[in-house]
Image (cartoon, grey):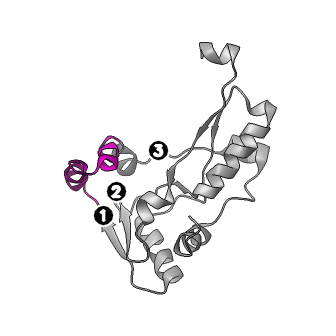
Amino acid sequence: MTAMLKHPITIARFPDFYGISTDPLPRSVRWFGPPRLAHQFIHIPDAAHAVRLLAEDEQSAGKVWHVTGAEPITGYQLRDIAREVTGRAVRLTVMSPGLIRLMGLGFAPARGLVETQYLWRSPMWLDATKFATRFGTQFIHTHREALQAIVNGRL
């Protein structure tokens, strides 16, 4: 906060990106907590667009902004959308904390997931009201649009 007095810093907070849970579509949707609990996601191009909006807006400097994608969604709902988008059977693979720890032994990115498991068991949702009021949400893709883009190789 002291540094921000001299050099305004804009902070953008995002929920999880689709890629971590939707790869490798079209076979499986990975879920890291109870699949009946909703979770927030944002499509990477939407997050990039939001960062550009914040960077170009002088009034956003020195503030914290929460940016979210479409409404929170459960693992079952995401799997069903993935099935519709791909036209194939898509599994919902629930990754337990033990399995994530085991994966972390040989796969460094999985180590970071262990520390964020609490976000999947007891969801903490970001409130993007401030961002939506200032910039709108017309550029945010629906879950279906985001998964379709992933299947088509567009992130």
Is most of the magenta stretch helix, strand or loop? helix
Kindly identify which numbered label has been placed on residue 94: 1
Give the residue pinned by disc 3. Answer: 124
Q: Which of marks 1 and 2 is nearer the N terminus?
A: 2
Q: Residues within 10 Å of mark 1 (few under 14, many from 20)?
A: some
Give the residue at x 58% y 72%: 144
Which residue type carries mark 3?
A: Met
Helix, strand or loop at label 1? It is strand
Kindly identify which numbered label has been placed on residue 4: none
- Image coordinates of residue 63 in percent, x first then y, are 68, 29
Q: Which of marks 1 and 3 is nearer the N terminus?
A: 1
Which residue type carries mark 1?
A: Val
Task: Reply yes or no: does residue 42 show up in magenta.
Answer: no
Give the residue at x 60% y 60%: 70
Instruction: Tell me the magenta residue range.
Output: 95-115
Would you identify the image quadrant in which residue 52 lies?
top right
Closer mark to the observer between disc 2 and disc 3: 2
Kindly identify which numbered label has been placed on residue 32: 2
- Image coordinates of residue 86 in percent, x first then y, are 49, 82
Marks 1 and 3 in Cβ contact (< 8 Å): no
Closer mark to the observer between disc 1 and disc 3: 1
Task: Reply yes or no: does residue 105 show up in magenta.
Answer: yes
Marks 1 and 2 in Cβ contact (< 8 Å): yes
Helix, strand or loop at label 2? It is loop
- Image coordinates of residue 4 in percent, x first then y, are 65, 18
Front-most of residues 126 and 143: 143
- Image coordinates of residue 136 in percent, x first then y, are 76, 51
